Image (spheres, rainbow, N blue to C red):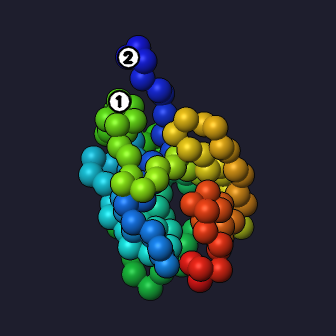
Amino acid sequence: MSGTTAFPINMIRLCIDEYGNDLSGRVYSKLMLVPLLFTGCSGLLLRMDDVFEQVGYPQAFQVRRTFFKPARLKGSIHVPEQLLDDEELGRQSGDCRTFDIIVQSRRQSGWQGILMDPERTSVKEFKSEMELLRCIWQELGESFEAAE
C-alpha cells in the first residue's frame, strides 16, 4: 500500500461535478461500495446523513424520532465494515472540485468536524451542517448567500 493515503473510516470524499446557484455531484465513503449522487446543498446533507445512518458511524448522540419502526438500531460498540479501499477512494475526484470531510461527532443535532482539500493545503473546522456548507462555498469562491 505504498504511496496510498490511509483514509479514516469517518471520512466522506465529496466530488463536486457542477456548481453555480447550487451544488451537484457524488459522495463516497469507505463504508459504501457505490457513490451516492446528490443535487443541491440539502441533497448533499441528506446523502451524507444516509451514509451515517446506514452504517451507524459516526454514531448519533441522540436517537432520531420516527413514525416508523427502525429496521435495526446499531449497537454502541458497532464497528462498521470497510467496503471501499483507500486506493479506490483516493482516485475519486469531482469535475469541478474535490473535498474530504471528516465528521468527528454528531452532537446537539448537528455535525462537527473538518473540511479539507485532498492535498491537505486548506483545512477548515465546522461545528454544524450550515458551517460546513459555508466552508464549502468559501472554498469554491462563492458567497454563501448565493447558495441560499
In the rendered view, tell whether residue 19 sits above or below residue 13: below
Q: Is residue 26 left or right of residue 66?
A: left
Q: Is residue 16 left or right of residue 116?
A: left
Q: Is residue 47 visible?
A: yes
User: Which of 139/92 is in front?
Assistant: 139
At a point 35% along the width and 30% down the height, the residue shown is 87
Badge 1 marks a residue whose secondary structure is helix
Badge 2 marks a residue whose secondary structure is loop
State the quadrant of the C terminus.
Answer: bottom right
In the rendered view, tell whether residue 53 sits above or below residue 3: below
Q: Position of residue 130 (x, y in %)?
A: 65, 71
**Looking at the image, which residue sits at the far top?**
2
State the quadrant of the N terminus.
Answer: top left
Residue under label 1: 87
At a point 42% along the width and 23% down the height, the residue shown is 4
User: Which of 128/121 is in front?
Assistant: 121
**Looking at the image, which residue sits at the far left?**
34
Q: Position of residue 80 (x, y in %)?
A: 42, 43
Q: How many marks?
A: 2
